[in-house]
Image (tube, rainbow, N blue to C red):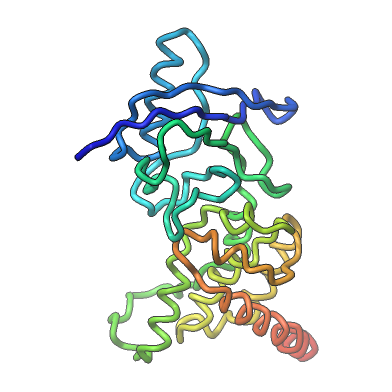
Amino acid sequence: MTHLTNLTLKIWRQSGPDDGGHFESYKVDEISDEASFLEMLDVLNERLINEGQEAVVFDHDCREGICGTCSLMIDGVAHGPQRGTATCQLHMRKFTSNVEIVVEPWRATGFPIIKDLMTDRAALDRIVEAGGYITAPTGGAPDANLIPVAKPVADAAMDAAECIGCGACVAACPNGAANLFTGAKITHLNLLPQGQAERFSRAEAMVEKMEEYFGSCTNHGECEAACPKSISIDVIALMNADYLKSKIKNRKSLSRT
């Protein structure tokens, strides 16, 4: 049976990067508990537009928990109260009627606000560009099963590859660190045989690019709790180990040239 929920939304409004920003409150009545959080915001925006007001700006794309675009702090929690869930997959049944919900953008120095609830997360792209790939030689592609991969290794690599790059780990971290994101992007390649040739150069380049934008990890563990894909902080330990090894391996390589 569908239930209807009445809510008060306290939403962060900011006209641009140079604006100080402020909260505004909106009443949203008779929202179906089967609606997603983003669908509820759609209803609010339709009403605002019909009233001649400016719609609330927020990021969204696939709405299937895949793209990582939906980036909202809901009552101070990245992606809201349901663990292992992206904002677009959060449904209104998780909220009781007649409550106030505070909606904010990601709060991190590395994610400057563009407008309202939308932030610039290009810094995550810069980290991937620094080495989050395997260089493919020219020629025909080899058969998929040509290089055997042990199942535990394949499983661990796939777990790390689940990262959707939403930035919730950064927003949840009291230091604004991106170690879970970077660790996941490094680990899913560094565990595989195909990633070994560039393993240590990848770790060094990506970690040092990360440090240009984000704070340092002090093992609070908030990143793992906030991650919509429940990626383990084990990837941070693996990243740190490879980074330390890279400082030795890469220096030895330079000394021989």
Q: Position of residue 130 (x, y in %)?
A: 63, 64
Name the one closer to the observer, 21 or 10.
Answer: 10
Which residue of the protein is positioned furthest toward the top in this rendering?
52
With 33 as the anchor, is 182 left or right in this view? right
With 238 as the anchor, is 79 left or right in this view? left
Q: Which residue is pictured at 69% across the width and 48% down the height?
A: 108
Q: Position of residue 129 (x, y in %)?
A: 59, 60
231 up-or-down from 85: above or below: below
Q: How many marks?
A: 0
Q: Which residue is pictured at 45% across the width and 69% down the height?
A: 161
134 up-or-down from 146: above or below: above
Image quarter of the N terminus: top left
Image quarter of the C terminus: bottom right
Q: Position of residue 145 (x, y in %)?
A: 28, 85
- Where is residue 248, by image quadrant? bottom right
**Residue 257 seen from this side:** no
- Where is residue 21, by image quadrant? top right
**Residue 17 seen from this side:** yes
Name the one closer to the observer, 210 or 134.
Answer: 210
Which residue of the protein is positioned furthest toward the left in this rendering?
1
Q: Which residue is pictured at 47% across the width and 44% down the height?
A: 70
84 up-or-down from 55: above or below: below
Q: Position of residue 63 (x, y in %)?
A: 36, 44
Q: Which residue is pictured at 59% across the width and 63% down the height?
A: 223
27 up-or-down from 130: above or below: above
- Where is residue 157, by image quadrant? bottom left
